[in-house]
Image (cartoon, rainbow, N blue to C red):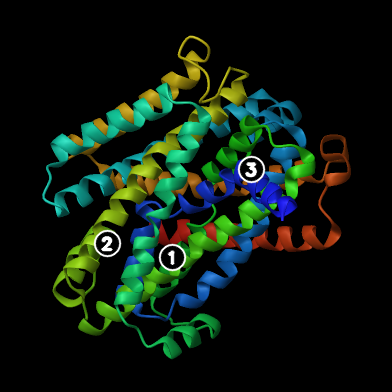
Amino acid sequence: MRRIFVKIGLFMSVIGPGIITANIDNDASGITTYSVAGARFGLSLLWTLIPTTVSLIVVQEMIARMGVVTGKGLSDLIRENYGVKATFFMMLGLFIANLGTTVANLSGWAASMEILGLSKYAMVPAGAVAIWLLVTKGTYRFVERVLLIACVLYFGYVLAGIMAKPAWSDVFKALVIPELKKDPQFIMLTIAIIGTTITPWMQFYLQSSIAEKGIRKEDYYLTKLDVIVGCSITDIVSFFIIVTCATVLFPMGIKITDASEAAVALRPFAGEFSYLLFAVSLANASILGAIIVPLATAYYTCEAMGWEAGVNKTFKEAPQFMWIYTSLIVISSLLVLIPGAPLITLMVLSSVLNGLILPFVLVYALRLSNNPKIMGKYTNSRFFNIVAWATVVTIVVLTVAMILFIFLI
């Protein structure tokens, strides 16, 4: 019995990076994608979550393993093995892309606050100051605990899905039997659901947070479990978002364009509680995304340039890290508050840049994880490489298709 409690205690000390990274992939943009998919096409796109989950676990496990074995962030390894110049241009593109993603998350926060009857002109600055203080004044352990507690709030979407009372036999049939349509919007949403799951910032944040946490090689099996649990939870949440909108909005012919519209549309059909669950969960997801994406940007930029980085450090100890984080929060907040600011253009640009950069990040990660000089005996197995390369090729094809759709539709 004592041994079991020791293992549970050890697991609790290791968990965090995998669960947080995967869950925050369900940010405002991700939730919008799932909400729109359910409202416009019912349960037809539910099957995409199975390959999505497999791909996410494969990539995140590889990244987490590199973090544990090397004790370094991904951009650190890319700089050391492929040079400063290539790393610099990748970091520059990622900075612009993540600025757009942070704007999207703060826009989601503003929209959810307005749904709840609060002014965005008060709540965006309040939210920005709160998350800035959390990261710049808190320790890594404290920030991680806050983020883990916030991840629990994602289960508001699970409750909303159960309360929608779907026909579960139809739901599980749609989950395991793929359905394809020639509709361009259907194809675009299929690509978006799979493509929005694996983003460049996730890989850098996961490896950097594992490196900062200092997880030992002998405890890696617990980190692997952390990653698998996190990836599973994030797609369970995605599953219930699609089910809710497919059950309540799709039969009524209500077509939405973002997650905040989904919350408002649910109100007359699913009741006040479901409406509030959706709105509060959107606020939670948006503010978490607004914390993590700038934090990931600060991590990998500083690692790439050889600067000090870490939540445990002060402004004096890691000025570049803290100022990069601060600048992203301030610029994004101002853009959200400026009337007529080109937010949609910036969000589209960020999607395109993420799509262009992602293949390079994944290929670098695969080459690094197969280098015995870096990974020792922890390199990928042959079977894992087959699955990983197949995943990368699929993601590259989908990413190219998504970018083409953005410009053609």
Residue under the point 58% across and 26% down: 88
Q: Is residue 30 left or right of residue 126?
A: right
Q: Nearer the viewer, mark 3 or mark 1?
A: 3
Mark 2 element type: helix
Distance between the Cα atoms at labels 3 and 1? 25 Å
Mark 1 element type: helix
Residue under the point 57% across and 43% down: 17
Based on the displayed image, in which of its 4 quarters is residue 215 positioned? top right
Which amino acid is tagged 1? Ser
Q: Earlier in the sequence, mark 3 or mark 1?
A: 3
Q: Which mark is residue 14?
A: 3
The residue labelled by disc 1 is: 238
Q: Nearer the viewer, mark 2 or mark 3?
A: 3
> Does residue 227 sit above or below 266 in this rendering?
above
Q: Are marks 3 and 1 in contact (CB under 8 Å)?
A: no
Mark 3 element type: helix
Q: Using the image as rendered, state which of residue 270 and residue 347 is in the foreground.
A: 270
Distance between the Cα atoms at labels 2 and 3? 30 Å
Instruction: List x then y, in percent, for residue 34.
Output: 38, 66
> Does residue 385 sit above or below 140 in this rendering?
below
Q: Is residue 316 left or right of residue 87?
A: left
The residue labelled by disc 2 is: 277
Image quarter where the N terminus lies is: bottom right
Which amino acid is tagged 2? Leu
Residue under the point 75% across and 37% down: 216
Q: Is residue 322 left or right of residue 265?
A: right
Q: Earlier in the sequence, mark 2 or mark 3?
A: 3
